[in-house]
Image (cartoon, rainbow, N blue to C red):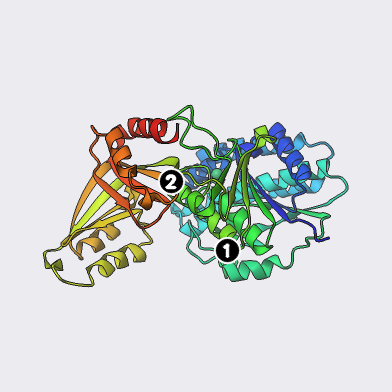
């Protein structure tokens, strides 16, 4: 019988301390994971960003302090693993020496290149995986537990900060992995390498995506995302405490949810699973026997509205041109600018002479992007919005839905809305100050 291939990913809180790592190792054992992909220990990526930025200001004493704290935490963690190999301690020490040298280099140059930034951020996952390999070894004495450098498999382009994976190269590289049921690979999420061998990262929260890419590469039977919440909820429980864990949803719904603000999965995670039709499980390391959420090609139960998400800090850009009347090509010019600057558009509506799009407000920090857009037409910017998305099924064929939605939030101004492109999603834009009440009201009336 062919061994079932399970790829499991553990997030930062699951690597947060020795007890959490033990939980994660127990899960890997029970689930018979072949590939275990881990995040940096909680808070470490933020600290590495701080180190990189501090170094670029020339403040080496502050960098030394931060690196020292990181070293203490990680060496302490390793010390807690009984009978760990001395080799792992040496690897960690070498990492800290390298990190210090890098920081020194940056303090001298007083500049932070994108390439250096990715390299510095990669240390978080590299450190946690060294320690976690020892923890897994202690739990699985009969298995061949190996530390795998994710950079040998996750090949990407050179778009530092948010590199794009090269799917073909990843699949080819993944063929060298031994999937014999006895080998367990512990590897890093978040990181990869480009064609010159430089370290790259997949963007914040990218470990989920890495795990999905590994799962695709080895054509896994199951991808498991282990985090610190017991699955995907009907909405953010901080907004609606009665929000429930969704037992099952489709790839399409999960993809929309991740894209439109559900924080639990990195938005790109679903695509590799879809390509190889791999079921995805989302569960909590700290409630490992709870039911969790399953994401599959199609869900058995298909309610109109399954979940409500919120994407905060949205800006609405309205691009207007007087010459658009009966003209063509205006849209392609606008989206050409978005494409060149790699700015993702979430929601679009058009009229005869203008196009309105929502984007994350941070993209406005890129002045060149705004200037380029201004060459196409007059640009009006409004901020302070949240994009609310109702995620469900067959949304554009539910005759009473719009009436139900808007009668529930009558007193709120809906600045823009979009329905019709996807049967799984109904988006609308409200003032950030209205968002919470909007979600609470709709959740109570549409989901219960
Ligand atoms: N450690 C990375 C981050 O904090 C990647 C991840 O945890 O998914 O963004
Ligand atoms: Mg995460």
Q: On the rendered structure, is 171 left or right of 387?
A: right
Above or below, 251 against 159 in this view is above
- Is disc 1 surrounded by few (<14), some (14 to 19) or many (20+) residues within 10 Å? few
Q: Residues within 10 Å of mark 2 (few under 14, many from 20)?
A: many
Which residue appears farthest toward the right when viewing the image? 142
Sequence-earlier tag: 2 or 1: 1
User: 269 or 380, which lies in front?
Assistant: 269
Give SS at disc 2.
Answer: strand
Quarter, ligand 2: top right
| Residue 398 spot, x, y in % from top left | 37, 48
Nearest the camera: 64 or 256? 256
Which residue occupies the foreground of this view, 153 or 224? Answer: 224
Say which residue appears at 24% left-offset and 61% top-offset.
373
* Relative image position of residue 131 (x, y in whole percent): 72, 43
Alpha carbon distance from label 2 to label 1? 22 Å
Tag in front: 2 or 1? 2
Residue at 39% from the left image edge and 49% from the top image edge = 395
Which quarter of the rendering shows the N terminus? bottom right
The image shows residue 67 at horizontal and vertical percentages of 59, 41
Q: Residue at x 53, y 51 (%)?
A: 250
Task: Please identify the quadrant where the C terminus is shown.
Answer: top left
Can see residue 262? yes
The numbered disc on residue 391 is 2
Outermost residue, front side: 399
Residue 241, relative to residue 157: is it above or below? above
Residue 141, position as x, y percentages in the image: 87, 45
Residue position for label 1:
275
Residue situated furthest top in the rendering = 241
């Amino acid at each position: 019988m062919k061994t079932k291939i399970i790829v499991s990913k553990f997030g930062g809180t699951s690597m947060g301390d020795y007890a959490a790592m033990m939980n994660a190792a127990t899960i890997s054992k029970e689930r018979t994971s072949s590939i275990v992909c881990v995040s940096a220990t909680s808070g470490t990526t933020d600290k590495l960003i701080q180190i990189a930025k501090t170094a670029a200001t020339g403040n080496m004493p502050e960098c030394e302090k931060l690196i020292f704290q990181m070293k203490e935490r990680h060496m302490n963690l390793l010390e807690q693993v009984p009978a760990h190999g001395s080799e792992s301690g040496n690897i960690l020490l070498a990492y800290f020496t390298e990190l210090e040298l890098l920081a020194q280099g940056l303090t001298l140059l007083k500049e932070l290149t994108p390439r250096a930034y990715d390299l510095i951020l990669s240390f978080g996952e590299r450190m946690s995986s060294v320690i976690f390999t020892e923890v897994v070894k202690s739990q699985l004495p009969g298995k061949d537990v190996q530390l795998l450098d994710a950079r040998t498999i996750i090949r990407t382009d050179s778009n530092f900060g948010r590199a794009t994976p090269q799917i073909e190269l990843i699949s080819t590289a993944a063929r060298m992995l031994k999937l014999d049921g006895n080998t367990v690979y512990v590897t890093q999420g978040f990181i990869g390498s480009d064609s010159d061998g430089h370290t790259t990262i997949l963007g914040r929260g990218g470990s989920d995506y890495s795990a999905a890419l590994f799962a695709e590469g080895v054509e896994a039977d199951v991808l498991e995302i282990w985090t610190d919440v017991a699955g995907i909820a009907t909405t953010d429980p901080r907004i609606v405490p009665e929000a429930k864990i969704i037992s099952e949803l489709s790839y399409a719904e999960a993809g929309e949810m991740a894209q439109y603000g559900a924080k639990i999965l990195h938005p790109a995670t679903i695509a590799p699973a879809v390509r190889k039709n791999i079921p995805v499980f989302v569960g909590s390391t700290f409630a490992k026997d709870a039911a969790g959420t399953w994401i599959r090609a199609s869900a058995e139960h298909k309610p109109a509205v399954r979940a409500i998400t919120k994407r905060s800090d949205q800006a609405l850009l309205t691009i207007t041109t007087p010459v658009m009347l009966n003209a063509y090509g205006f849209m392609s010019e606008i989206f050409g600018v978005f494409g060149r600057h790699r700015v993702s558009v979430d929601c679009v509506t058009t009229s005869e002479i203008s196009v309105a799009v929502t984007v994350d407000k941070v993209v406005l920090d890129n002045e060149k992007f705004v200037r380029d857009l201004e060459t196409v037409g007059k640009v009006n910017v409004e901020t302070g919005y949240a994009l609310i998305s109702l995620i469900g099924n067959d949304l554009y064929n539910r005759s009473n839905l719009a009436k139900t939605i808007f009668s529930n939030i009558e007193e709120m101004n809906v600045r823009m809305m979009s329905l019709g492109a996807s049967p799984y999603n109904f988006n609308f834009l409200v003032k950030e100050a209205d968002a919470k009440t909007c979600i609470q009201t709709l959740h109570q009336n549409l989901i219960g």
